[in-house]
Image (spheres, rainbow, N blue to C red):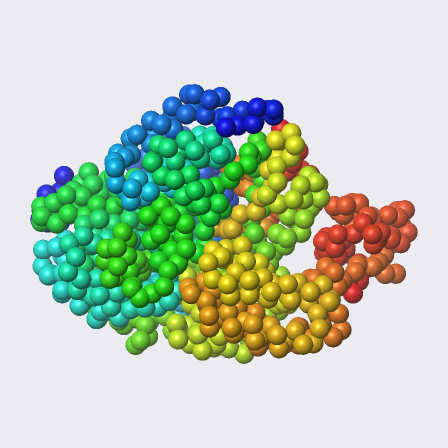
């Protein structure tokens, strides 16, 4: 039990002075690491260490996501004597023991990965290869998220200690204001401003909410933080509670994230047991408790008023602002809603100091942003870059461009609410305002890369289908307008589009933007407008020529076998509907009535014998 | 009341031990006479009820509404709003094709079509023998393995339409 701040520092010192093993092996065991087979690797390492009786040399630690999803399962070996860090990717249970056998050296036969980041809190940037600066992800992949001591030894809960003993609530709010931190959930509203509004309210009961309802398909940074470093969020919430005068906080988390929920539950229990959360935190007389609330699969609940209704046990429909939640939120009380990543930045700000924090990022948006790179990119994963980094650096330096040498076409940021950014704008420094100027938005940080094989009309249709599904139905423009937009796009993709649809799409999209109540409706036509602005040629090809340039829209393409066919039967063997027939060594034929246009034959043929028209 | 003519008997009556499990959970939450307080517990009660019964038919909804002293209409309103809750029974094997953006651009659409064709089911349907349910799920967060299919708790990565029969054959 830590009942005073001095005791916290003392405990941290003791932990720091505990003798370490010569090396630590960190195994990335976030959801993606486990899905890629991380657990068997962990077990293999465990038995390799036990078999060789090397427990005194190697300390095996399960951690959260290291961000290198492209090479999962990944492990990192830290040799403490030299400070050397070795990253291995694509580790298998079979080759894992080589790491143990290599001792203090580097194991051969396992792919090595380079470290493309530095942690501004602990070290200086030493090379240009370090495009990433990790503040939010600092502990992810470095500590065991289920052991509070590992968080403590890295300076955990010292920010809270500093705040509770040396600062008044007003000073805390001022410090967050001065840091220039903006909401990382997408909107980019200054966090300090929100806190200031709530702190000014005279109500006795106030609430603090953490929005962990990460609904944007293709974004998984919040999950990584909650799975890899749950205490950072808890500590920040306690700081926020003190600043605005709230004694109770909620984390609203997706039910689809079982591992994050489990690790949060463990973290809350451990923090309460240590006296770092709950009643009379560290003997300072400050109280703050945190409770988990589960979402139930509604994208609109990422909107703060809808989220509040969901916590109240109602349908998650948004309501008109003002009154803002900071004035009247959960059960009518002043309430702050911040995103996971925003919270995770806060302890670092107090530990590093405002000056060092503001050195990273831009003048108007200091700090870093985590992005989830996915889609047709070579190196998928999580990256955390200073705000203001050119988009090109993120995609080509960190992501290494498109897979299989395909040509880059566009990157979608902001998920279903955002837009696409094309080659022309790749040198734009990434920031809330620059992205809005490009007709997209920062959003929660999903970055989906598309290559030459993606049809942009079809992409716009995909996002609208998502919005249709997720629209709560409260406002007519969003409920019916988006349906009409979708119908038109479907007709265009089916080759039934007419030229006047371009104008009708644009008009309707603007009406929906102007007349919807919440962020979901206001931004839902963005993918349509953005693809129309950047890829009008593709829309026109669908409408005028009934042709899908990327060869995706199934109603507009047919597959035929040409004279290059040598009768190798590969396509026929791979066809899922068995619609390709022909004798060995003779030209094959596709039965067009049965063909589902999946493209498997096109991709498997080694002789360029399949035409897509 | 449940229909007496079909097999679907009232779950609450049919499974007293499951009902007792749900009641123990709800009672442990500390209900009181404050409607607002009870309503705040509704969603977690429904999560637990669906976990216990597999789905949320009318009888279960009525039971929860009585326990929490809420109107049935409120309970139904919540269930019909959130995608996570289902009013129809699901199959033994819940096949979920990820329809997140990353999986979509990598061809999850053709995989889903192949599952539909192979199982002769539409998205959201359950086979007559209650063996398979076919659904879509918005992003499992395993984007590096896209396209991803999840069968109960097992994750299949880099799925192609060709792999569909193999995946189904493993469900035995």
Relative image position of residue A472 (x, y in whole percent): 47, 55
Relative image position of residue A292 (x, y in whole percent): 31, 44
Decide if residue A99 is on the left or right side of residue A195: right
Q: Classify A439 as above or below A216.
A: below
- Relative to the observer, which residue lies in front, B138 or A505? A505
Q: Classify A95 as above or below A599.
A: above
Relative image position of residue B118 (x, y in whole percent): 71, 41
**Residue at the image point whose x is 21% and y is 71% from the top:** A178
Decide if residue A72 is on the left or right side of residue B21: right
- Relative to the observer, which residue lies in front, B33 or A606? B33
Q: Quadrant of residue B92?
A: top right
**Residue at the image point whose x is 32% and y is 68% from the top:** A189
- Relative to the observer, which residue lies in front, A531 or A79? A531
Q: Quadrant of residue A245?
A: bottom left
**Residue at the image point whose x is 29% and y is 42% from the top:** B35
| Residue A154 visible from this viewpoint | no
Decide if residue A307 is on the left or right side of residue A278: right
**Which quadrant is home to the C terminus of chain A?**
bottom right
Q: Quadrant of residue A132?
A: bottom left
Relative image position of residue A423 (x, y in whole percent): 55, 75
| Residue A576 visible from this viewpoint | yes
**Which quadrant is home to the N terminus of chain A?**
top left
């Amino acid at each position: 039990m830590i009942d005073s701040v001095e005791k916290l520092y003392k405990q941290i010192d003791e932990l720091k002075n505990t003798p370490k093993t010569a090396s630590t092996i960190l195994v990335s065991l976030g959801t993606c690491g486990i899905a890629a087979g991380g657990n068997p690797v962990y077990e293999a390492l465990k038995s390799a260490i036990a078999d060789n009786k090397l427990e005194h040399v190697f300390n095996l630690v399960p951690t959260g996501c290291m961000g290198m999803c492209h090479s999962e399962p990944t492990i990192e070996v830290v040799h403490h004597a030299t400070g050397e860090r070795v990253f291995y990717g694509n580790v298998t249970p079979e080759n894992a023991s080589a790491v143990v056998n290599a001792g203090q050296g580097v194991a051969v036969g396992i792919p090595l990965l380079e470290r493309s980041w530095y942690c501004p809190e602990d070290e200086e940037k030493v090379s240009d290869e370090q495009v990433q600066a990790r503040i939010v992800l600092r502990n992810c992949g470095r500590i065991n998220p289920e052991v509070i001591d590992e968080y403590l030894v890295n300076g955990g809960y010292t920010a809270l200690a500093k705040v509770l003993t040396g600062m008044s609530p007003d000073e805390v709010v001022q410090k967050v204001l001065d840091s220039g931190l903006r909401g990382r959930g997408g909107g980019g509203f200054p966090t300090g401003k929100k806190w200031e509004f709530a702190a000014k309210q005279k109500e006795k009961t106030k609430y603090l909410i953490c929005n962990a309802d990460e609904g944007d398909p293709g974004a998984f940074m919040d999950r990584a933080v909650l799975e890899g470093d749950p205490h950072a969020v808890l500590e920040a919430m306690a700081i926020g509670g003190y600043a605005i005068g709230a004694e109770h906080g909620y984390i609203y988390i997706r039910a689809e994230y079982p591992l994050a929920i489990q690790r949060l539950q463990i973290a809350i229990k451990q923090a309460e047991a240590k006296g770092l959360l709950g009643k009379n935190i560290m003997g300072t007389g400050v109280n703050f408790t945190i409770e988990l609330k589960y979402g139930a699969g509604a994208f609109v609940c990422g909107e703060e008023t809808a989220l509040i209704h969901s916590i109240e046990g109602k349908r998650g429909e948004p309501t008109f602002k003002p009154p803002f939640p900071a004035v009247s939120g959960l059960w009518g009380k002043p309430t702050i809603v911040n995103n996971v990543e925003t919270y995770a930045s806060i302890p670092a700000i107090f530990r590093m100091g405002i000056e060092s924090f503001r050195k990273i990022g831009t003048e108007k948006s200091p700090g870093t942003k985590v992005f989830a790179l996915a889609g047709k990119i070579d190196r998928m994963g999580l990256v955390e870059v200073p705000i203001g980094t050119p988009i090109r650096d993120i995609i080509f330096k960190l992501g290494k461009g498109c897979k299989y040498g395909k040509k880059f076409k566009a990157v979608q940021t902001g998920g279903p609410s955002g837009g696409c950014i094309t080659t022309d704008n790749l040198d734009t420094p990434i920031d809330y305002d620059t992205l809005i100027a490009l007709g997209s938005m920062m959003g929660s940080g999903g970055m989906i890369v598309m290559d030459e094989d993606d049809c942009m009309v079809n992409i716009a249709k995909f996002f609208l289908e998502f919005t249709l599904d997720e629209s709560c139905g409260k406002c007519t423009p969003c409920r019916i307008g988006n349906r009409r937009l979708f119908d038109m796009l479907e007709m265009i993709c089916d080759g039934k589009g007419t030229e006047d649809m371009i104008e009708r799409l644009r008009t309707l999209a603007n009406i929906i933007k102007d007349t919807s109540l919440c962020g979901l409706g206001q931004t839902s036509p963005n993918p349509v407008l953005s693809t129309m602005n950047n890829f009008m040629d593709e829309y026109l090809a669908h409408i005028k020529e009934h042709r899908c340039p990327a060869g995706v829209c199934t109603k507009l393409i047919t597959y035929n076998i040409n004279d290059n066919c040598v009768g190798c039967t590969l396509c026929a063997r791979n066809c899922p509907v068995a619609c390709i027939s022909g004798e060995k060594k003779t030209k094959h034929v596709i039965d067009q009535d049965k063909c589902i246009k999946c493209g498997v034959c096109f991709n498997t043929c080694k002789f360029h014998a399949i035409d897509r028209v | 009341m449940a229909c007496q003519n079909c097999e679907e008997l009232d779950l609450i009556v049919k499974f007293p031990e499951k009902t007792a499990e749900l009641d123990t959970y709800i009672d442990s939450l500390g209900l009181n006479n404050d409607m607002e307080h009870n309503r705040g517990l509704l969603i977690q009660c429904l999560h637990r009820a669906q976990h216990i019964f597999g789905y949320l038919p009318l009888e279960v909804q009525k039971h929860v509404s009585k326990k929490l002293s809420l109107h049935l209409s409120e309970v139904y309103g919540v269930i019909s709003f959130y995608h996570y809750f289902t009013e129809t029974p699901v199959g033994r094997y819940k096949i979920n094709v990820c329809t997140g953006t990353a999986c979509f651009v990598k061809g999850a659409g053709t995989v889903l079509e192949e599952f539909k064709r192979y199982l002769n089911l539409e998205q959201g349907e359950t086979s007559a023998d209650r063996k398979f349910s076919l659904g879509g799920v918005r992003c499992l967060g395993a984007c590096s393995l896209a396209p991803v299919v999840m069968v109960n708790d097992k994750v299949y990565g880099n799925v192609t339409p060709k792999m569909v029969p193999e995946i189904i054959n493993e469900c035995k």
